């Protein structure tokens, strides 16, 4: 079920009413309702993959007890079993075909021609997200940050809570489980905030991202015939499409969770206002980058074992992060490009320069220097997004080459104007809200007008029901 | 909780109401942009106007877009007019004849319909006849009763019996120009309304000038088609029950008004003919036409050219000016004039 579908518009109020009016007296029954709703939500795509989700959940629940054993050797054995189990699921469903094809091509280079068996199975939606939920739970128990949960329903809700099931944010057991186990009370302010987030998320997805998607798809499909300026605008449009799409999804997820009394982790903090790549990664898909930081980068030694190891670890997490997105060289290249962008900051010890503040914190506009820094960072990120968006490496390189050589084709000013119409309001709104995230400071009547205008736009644009980009991961 | 629910409901209501007022306002002021493609709107409205007024022409051609394109009434004679409506079938044909007879006398009726529309697999009924309100509400209700009798939705047999009442209700909303029936296409309409006013005005002028000059004939241009095959040879032709009912009604009107009736199968391009020739589709169509000939003594199926060379087509289905000229001459010869 998509957030931007009519089914979800019926599903959400139904679950909301049952949750607060029918099962409001018992936490246990509220959790059971959420679990059933989550499986229904997930099963709407394919009931077959529900079995995989249930199996993965059940195994990690059991491993949780094993990892909590006093005997550290046995605990480590269960930890590895959990890692093997989760990565095994990913390896089979997401990466098997990639590795099999690479193996075949490798043998072909040696003159050995073989036909490898490929799996004809669709990648289960959200597989990368729920396996990472499970792993974070087991890791936290192993590191004594979390006690194993006895109630299976509570744990199953943590893994499969429908707002975050298919595209995150990737939650931590220590953050979400206490909320699942605590009695929840309806809070007017929290629910209203949730509705605002849902509205804003729908606006970003339905109005901005889906409209840009039409332009971007056209440019990337026919990049040979486009003028260089159109290709540059196309890449910029994709930067905002993926931002609108993914941050829109996250806002709807966060807003939906608030309606049920949950607070999820923040996943985006105005990433395109970042002044360097390090800041960008503290603002973009925060739950994934912090997951890799906590469960991969730090266990590998982080930056505390000398520069050389820090460089190695940085490259490992960026390449793995790229590979996490999909079994393709283009994602690995995308991760590698970001690692290269991060490297100078790491070597010059400037990677932790902008950790807490937001650009122009006390001012209305950025300084010239800040503006230049933001533009350089955005250009770099946009360059990397070309690899992410292209069908494969060849297309990405072809696109970038055409972006600097195609000057004979006619310019498409109307397309550039359309892109501006969609991205300028988004940048303006984000800039307005950047200090106090999502808190709109305006007189009540103006706020009401803004909400109604946003709702009208969503209503007019609603209906195409395109998938969220991150669903494929 | 109560406060939250009230506030949310209030916002939803205001949004829905406002969107209804906005969409409804635009539809009522500029229907040509919001009910479908503007050219279709102008063409259909012109034809509806001709059908509902006294024209003095006593020989009429009714049909779909291929009827519009394949016969130039000027070539048939002074008393001929082409009242074809693009995307229509026997149902609209019956309404056309019924209305035209209210103001005019008719001695000859030529029906030109592509067989796929008679099978009721066309989407145009819901895209033109319903939004443009060619039929009255009473006629729509009559159709609904017929649908209930035959247990399927007109031109959408795949919709299933279970949802028939609901589908009829949705169609009625569309008929009454309910704003939410046009929500999905509203932005496209708004875009055209803002940026294509001049072009639309030119299109209107062109369409109306052509229709009035050629008495309802539409020229599909002079370009050759790419000779693509549009026939599914394995298909068994099955006329829709509702269409057969309305053909019956046409024949009754013809009987009552002493009208000579001719049925013409419009020509196809060469590639389509190659597939069609000796196929199951051809044999089942021939069976149907022979059956009609036997059933209605007043009806004559004209043996016109089944196909024309590719150079005579404007697109896959419709003949161009040369094709019209050739086919009209052929029809004229067959009619014995």
Image (spheres, grey):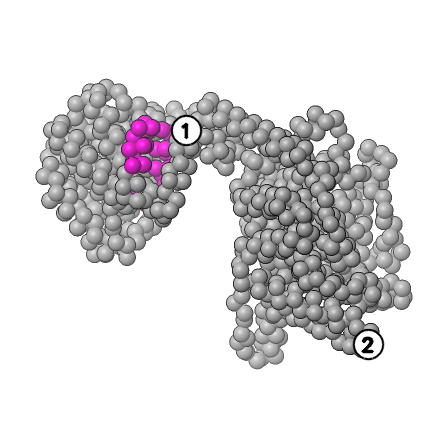
Give the x, y percent position of residue A333: 69, 60
Give the left or right position of residue A390, taking residue A279 as reference: left
Q: Nearer the viewer, residue A336 or A398?
A: A336
Residue found 89% across the figure and 56% down from its top: A349
- How crowded pointer 1 is (Cα within 10 Å; few <14, some 14-19, many 20+) is rated as some
Is residue B148 placed above or below A55 in the rendered structure? above
Residue at the spot of label 2? A71
Q: Is residue A275 magenta?
A: no
Residue at the spot of label 1? B176
Q: Nearer the viewer, residue B106 or A55?
A: A55
Is residue A60 placed above or below A10 in the rendered structure? below
Q: Nearer the viewer, residue B17 or A154?
A: A154
For the residue labelled by badge 2, is the local secondary structure a helix, a strand or a loop?
A: loop
Give the left or right position of residue A186, taking residue A216 as reference: right
For the residue labelled by badge 1, is the local secondary structure a helix, a strand or a loop?
A: loop
Q: Is residue B129 magenta?
A: yes
What is the chain letter for disc 1? B
Residue found 77% across the figure and 31% down from its top: A441
The answer to whether one can see residue A244 in this image is no
What is the chain letter for disc 2? A
Q: Which residues are magenta?
A: B120-145
Give the x, y percent position of residue A351: 85, 54
């Amino acid at each position: 079920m998509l957030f931007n579908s009519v089914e979800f518009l019926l599903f959400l109020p139904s679950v909301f009413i049952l949750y607060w009016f029918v099962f409001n007296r018992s936490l246990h029954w509220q959790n059971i309702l959420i679990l059933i709703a989550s499986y229904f939500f997930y099963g709407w795509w394919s009931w077959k993959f529900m079995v995989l989700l249930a199996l993965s959940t059940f195994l990690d629940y059991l491993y949780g007890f094993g990892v909590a054993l006093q005997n550290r050797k046995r605990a480590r054995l269960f930890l590895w079993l959990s890692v093997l189990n989760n990565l095994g699921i990913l390896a089979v469903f997401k990466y098997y075909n990639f590795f099999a094809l690479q193996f075949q091509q490798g043998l072909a280079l040696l003159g050995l021609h073989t036909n490898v068996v490929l799996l004809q199975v669709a990648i289960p939606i959200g597989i990368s997200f729920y396996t990472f939920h499970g792993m974070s739970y087991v890791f936290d128990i192993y590191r004594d940050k979390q006690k194993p949960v006895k109630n299976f329903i509570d744990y199953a809700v943590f893994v499969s809570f429908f707002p975050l099931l298919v595209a995150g944010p990737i939650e931590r057991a220590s953050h979400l489980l206490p909320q699942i186990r605590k009695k929840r009370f309806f809070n007017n302010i929290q629910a209203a905030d949730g509705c605002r987030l849902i509205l804003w998320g729908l606006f970003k997805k339905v109005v901005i991202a889906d409209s840009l998607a039409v332009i971007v798809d056209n440019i990337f499909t026919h990049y040979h015939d486009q003028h260089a300026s159109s290709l540059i605008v196309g890449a910029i449009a994709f930067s905002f499409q993926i931002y609108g799409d993914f941050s829109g999804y996250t806002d709807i997820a966060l807003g939906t969770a608030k309606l049920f009394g949950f607070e999820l982790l923040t996943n985006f903090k105005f990433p395109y206002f970042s002044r360097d790549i390090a800041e960008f990664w503290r603002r973009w898909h925060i739950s994934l980058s912090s997951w890799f930081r906590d469960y991969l980068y730090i266990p590998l030694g982080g930056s505390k074992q000398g520069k050389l190891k820090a460089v190695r670890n940085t490259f490992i997490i960026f390449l793995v992060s790229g590979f996490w997105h999909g079994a393709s060289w283009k994602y690995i290249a995308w991760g590698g490009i970001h690692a290269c962008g991060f490297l100078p900051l790491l070597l010059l010890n400037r990677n932790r320069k902008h950790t807490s503040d937001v650009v122009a914190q006390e001012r209305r506009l950025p300084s010239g220097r800040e503006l230049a820094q933001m533009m350089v960072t955005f250009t770099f990120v946009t360059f990397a997004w070309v690899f992410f968006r292209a069908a494969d490496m060849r297309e990405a390189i072809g696109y970038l080459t055409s972006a600097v050589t195609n000057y004979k084709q006619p310019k498409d000013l109307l397309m550039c104007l359309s892109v501006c119409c969609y991205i300028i309001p988004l940048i303006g709104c984000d800039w307005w809200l950047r200090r106090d995230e999502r808190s709109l400071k305006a007189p009540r009547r103006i706020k009401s007008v803004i909400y109604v205008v946003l709702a009208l736009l969503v209503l007019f644009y609603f209906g195409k029901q395109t998938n969220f980009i991150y669903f494929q991961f | 909780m109560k406060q939250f629910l009230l506030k949310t409901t209030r916002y939803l209501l205001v949004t829905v109401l406002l969107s209804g007022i906005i969409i409804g306002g635009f539809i009522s002021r500029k229907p040509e942009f919001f009910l479908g493609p503007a050219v279709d709107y102008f063409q259909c409205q012109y034809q509806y106007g001709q059908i509902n007024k006294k024209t003095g022409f006593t020989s009429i051609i009714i049909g779909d877009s291929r009827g519009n394109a394949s016969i130039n009434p000027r070539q048939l004679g002074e008393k001929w007019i082409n009242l074809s409506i693009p995307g229509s079938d026997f149902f609209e044909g019956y309404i056309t004849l019924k209305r035209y007879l209210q103001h005019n006398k008719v001695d000859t009726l030529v029906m030109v319909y592509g067989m796929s529309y008679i099978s009721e697999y066309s989407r145009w009924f819901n895209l033109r006849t319903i939004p443009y309100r060619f039929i009255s509400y009473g006629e729509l209700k009559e159709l609904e009763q017929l649908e209930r009798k035959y247990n399927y939705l007109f031109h959408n047999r795949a919709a299933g019996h279970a949802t028939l009442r609901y589908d009829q209700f949705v169609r009625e909303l569309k008929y009454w120009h309910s704003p939410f029936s046009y929500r999905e296409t509203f932005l496209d309409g708004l875009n055209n309304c803002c940026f294509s006013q001049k072009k639309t005005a030119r299109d209107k002028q062109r369409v109306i000038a052509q229709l009035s000059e050629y008495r309802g004939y539409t020229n599909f241009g002079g370009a050759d088609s790419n000779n693509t095959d549009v026939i599914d040879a394995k298909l068994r032709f099955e006329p829709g029950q509702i269409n057969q009912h309305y053909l019956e009604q046409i024949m009754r009107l013809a009987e009552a008004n002493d009208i000579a009736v001719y049925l013409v199968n419009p020509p196809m391009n060469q590639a389509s003919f190659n597939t069609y020739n000796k196929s199951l589709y051809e044999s089942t169509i021939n069976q149907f036409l022979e059956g009609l000939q036997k059933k209605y003594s007043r009806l004559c199926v004209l043996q016109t050219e089944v196909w024309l060379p590719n150079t005579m087509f404007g697109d896959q289905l419709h003949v161009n000016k040369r094709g019209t000229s050739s086919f009209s001459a052929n029809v004229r010869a067959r009619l014995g004039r």
